[in-house]
Amino acid sequence: MFALLLILSLAAGAQEQPDFRYDVLRSKVWKDEPGQLLITASGIDYRSVNGKTSIQLPYVDIREMDLSDSGTIRIQTYDMLKKRLSGRRAYTFHLRRLRGVRHDENLVKFLSDRMSRPVLASYTMNAQPEFEIPAYHRHVLSGCSGTIRITPEGLQFLSTNEEHSRTWLYSEVMTFGGSDPFSFRITTLAETYTFDLKEPLSRQAYESVWQRVYDLPPRYNTQTNSGPLARQ
């Protein structure tokens, strides 16, 4: 009887650890390669349809995982390539079918629980935003508009360009700041986002982020203090 209960328990546990399987096109220089991508508790596995290509990546070997585009999965490893200066080995997989919002959030959580570095993605937070600031995110040659949300769980940027939307837990933010009340910058291990704010960042909004990122007690009640931020 005990053995039967143990088997049932193990089976239930296995069901709680779902695999994510996708029909994909692996991006290549001359011609994209059709295959299947499998994301499991132990890592990433890719196999081409013709059986000529097989790629296995444990999570410890993955430097960056980009899920910002619901139709693409980008993976960068730690391996440096001799053919490109400062270039790392990277894989791009285009999905045959777009990931749904709920599926995407389950995938991000699944990967975040297993990777030591942040996953580049946007997902829903349970807590309601305490502050919302319209902002313009600067790109290298252009930019996009959106809204910065400050919540008890972390920071979000919801962009008009979905690929540039992001969610950052406070534990993922390395530094943040700005040179004046109309600028804001967020830096993680993976990227830096620089914003031009369309409204001044209030002192209480700045302080709420400050004490959460750097794990410091609030210097005053952020719910009652008001006024634009005055930086030293």
Image (cartoon, grey):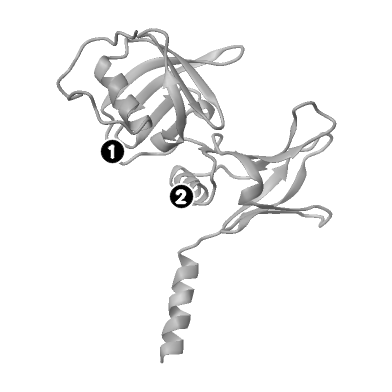
Left or right side of 93 for 129: left
Q: Residues within 10 Å of mark 2 (few under 14, many from 20)?
A: some
Left or right side of 130 for 108: right
Left or right side of 78 for 213: left
Query: Mark 2 or mark 1: which comes first in sequence?
Result: 2
- Which residue is most to the left? 224
Q: Nearer the viewer, residue 13 or 217?
A: 217
- Return the x and y of residue 207 as percentages of the image width and height: 29, 22
**Which residue appears at 42% of the width and 9% of the height?**
179
- Return the x and y of residue 160 as percentages of the image width and height: 46, 22
Amino acid under label 1?
Ala
Q: Is residue 84 above or below residue 66?
A: above
Of marks 2 and 1, the one in the foreground: 1
Q: Secondary structure at mark 1?
A: loop
Q: Which numbered marker is on residue 127?
A: 1
Amino acid under label 2?
Asn
Q: Residues within 10 Å of mark 1 (few under 14, many from 20)?
A: few
Q: Which residue is mark 2?
A: 106
**Which residue appears at 45% of the width and 15% of the height?**
195
